[in-house]
Image: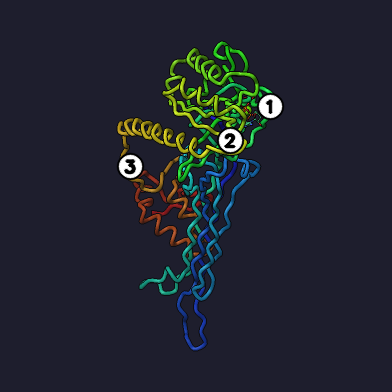
Amino acid sequence: MLFVDKVKLEIKAGNGGNGAISFHREKYVDKGGPAGGDGGRGGSIYFTSDSGLTTLLDIKYRRIIEAKSGENGGKNNMYGRSAEDIYVKVPVGTVVTNLDDNRIIADFKKPNETKLIAKGGRGGRGNAKFCNSVNQVPKVAENGEPGEDFNASVELKLLADVGLVGLPSVGKSSIISCVSACKPEIASYHFTTLIPNLGVVRSGDDSFVMADLPGLIEGASQGKGLGLQFLRHIERCKVLIHVVDMGQEEGRDALEDFRVINKELEKYKTILLNKPMIVAANKMDVDGAKENLERFKKEFKDYDIFPISSLTHSGLDALIFKANEIVKKEKESALLSEEDIQTSHVYKIKEKDKGYIITHPSLHLWVVSGERIEKLYRMTNITDDEGFMYLISVMRKMGIDDELTELGAVDGDTIKLCDLEMDYFS
Ligand SMILES: Nc1nc2c(ncn2[C@@H]2O[C@H](COP(=O)(O)OP(=O)(O)OP(=O)(O)O)[C@@H](O)[C@H]2O)c(=O)[nH]1
Ligand SMILES: [Mg+2]
C-alpha cells in the first residue's frame, strides 16, 4: 500500500556574507596592509528522518524553508559570523525532488539519516586574501556565494511492510494504536475503519510500517463489504498479521473466523496466502479466551501464534519482534534483487566542463553564460575598477577571450554576461 502526502515549497539556503575591503590605519605606519575580512558562511538546510513522524504536517503549511545569510566581513581582518544551519525533521519514506531540474535530492529509507538539501553559500574573501607580490594594496573583495535556492516537492511515500487483516471488530485498529503513533478510531461496531491507517512501528533499532486495514468479511473477494478495494493493497505488504478475536464476544468461533478470512485471501489471489503470516490471538483478557486459544493451537499447528491483549498491552512486544524479524529478512532479499539491477547501470563519463558557453544571438552580440562564470560574476564586487579587472582577468584565464577571437568577435562588439555588458577589444 502506498500512502502519499505531498508538499511543494521553496527551499533557500543562506547567502555567504560579502568579503570586506579595508586597510590597516595605524598612526605611524605609512601605508597599512589590506585588512578586509572574509564574509561568513550562509546557513545550509538539512533534513533528518525521524521514525516518530508519520506525516508531513510539520512542513505542510510552509511556503518556504529558509536559512539566514552569513554576516559580511569587517575591518581589521574580522571574519563575518557564519549563519546557523537548519535541521528539519521528516518521516522515513520522504523523497525530496528539486522541481527546477526534476532531480531527486534525497530519499530517506531509514530513521536517523541526515542529508544536505540546500547548501549555504561560501563567504566572500576579503581583500586581505587578494594580497600578493604584484598587488600589495588590493582593492578587490568577493561577494558571498549565493545559497542554493529552488522549488522542491517533498513527498512521503510509505509502503506498508506489515498488514493487519481480519474480520471487523477483532481489534486491528486497537493494535496499531498500541504499537505506533497512529491513533485511528476504535469502536465496537463493524467497519469502524473505512480507509487504511498507517503507523511506523519501532522494534529495537529497526522500524517498519504497519497498515491497519478495514475489516474483511466472507465474500470480500467478490466485492462484499469494504474488502475488495483493499485486498489489492495487501498484495504489497511483506508480512500479514492475521488478527483473530479469541474472546468471541460476538458469538463467533475463532477457528471458523480464521478459515473464512484465509479462504477470501486465497480466492482473491493465492499469492496472498503464500505470504508470511503470523497470528495475533487478540482479546486474551476475556473469559474463555484461553480455552479457545488451546483449541486454535491444536487445529493450526503450522502457524506462529501470539496470544495478546491490546486492552492490557500484553504479548505485543513478542508479536512486533517476530514481525520485524520477518520484515528484515524480506527486505534483505528484496535488496539483493535491487543490487542485481544496479549492476546493469551505465555510467556516463562526465565531459570536462569548461565553465561557460558562448552564444552569438545577433550580429555584434556575444552572450557568455554557464554556471561557473555566472557564479564568478555574482561573487565579484565590480562596483570597483579593481573588482572589474579581476573579473576580466579570470575570464581571460578561463579562455573566454581566445574563444571569442576564434569565433570571430571584432572590436566594438558587445559581450553580455548576466546583466553586465562590456565592449570587446582584442
Ligand atoms: N476486551 C478487549 N477488547 C478489545 C481488545 N482489543 C480491541 N478490543 C475492543 O474491540 C472493539 C473493536 O476494536 P477495533 O480496534 O476498532 O477493531 P477493528 O478490527 O479495527 O474493527 P474494524 O475497523 O471495524 O474492522 C473495540 O470496542 C475495542 O475496544 C482486547 O484486547 N480486549
Ligand atoms: Mg479498525
Foreground mark, 1 or 2, reads: 1
State which mark lies toward you, 3 or 2.
2
The answer to whether residue 228 is above or below residue 78 is above
- Distance from label 3 to label 2 (Cα)? 35 Å
Q: Position of residue 231 (x, y in %)?
A: 53, 20
- Quarter assignment of residue 357: top left
Residue 248 percent coordinates (x, y): 61, 23
- Label 1 vs 2, first from the N-terminus: 2
Badge 2 element: strand
Choose the circle earlier in sequence order: 3 or 1.
1
| Identity of the residue drawn at 51% across and 63% down | 40
Residue 380, numbered label? none
**Image position of 245 (left or right of 344):** right
Task: Name the residue at 56% across, 46% down.
Answer: 11
Circle 1 residues within 10 Å: few <14, some 14–19, many ≥20: few
Residue at image coords 38%, 31% = 334
Q: Earlier in the sequence, mark 3 or mark 2?
A: 2
Ligand 2 is found in which quarter of the picture? top right
Q: What amino acid type is highlighted by mark number 1?
A: Ser
Q: Confirm or reject: label 1 Cβ below 8 Å from ligand 1.
A: yes
Residue 75 position (above or below residue 321):
below
Quadrant of the rendering where the C terminus is positioned = bottom left
Residue kind at label 3, given as amino acid type: Glu
Mark 3 and 1 residues: CB-CB less than 8 Å, in contact?
Answer: no
- Using the image, tell me which numbered label, if any, was put on residue 188: 1
Spatial CA span between label 1 and label 2: 33 Å
The percent position of residue 132, horizontal first and vertical second, equals 38, 71
For disc 2, the marked residue is 6
Identify which residue, 201 or 298, lies in the foreground. 298
Pointer 3 residue? 351
Residue 167 is situated, as x and y percent measured from the top left of the image, at 59, 21
Q: Is residue 94 visible?
A: no
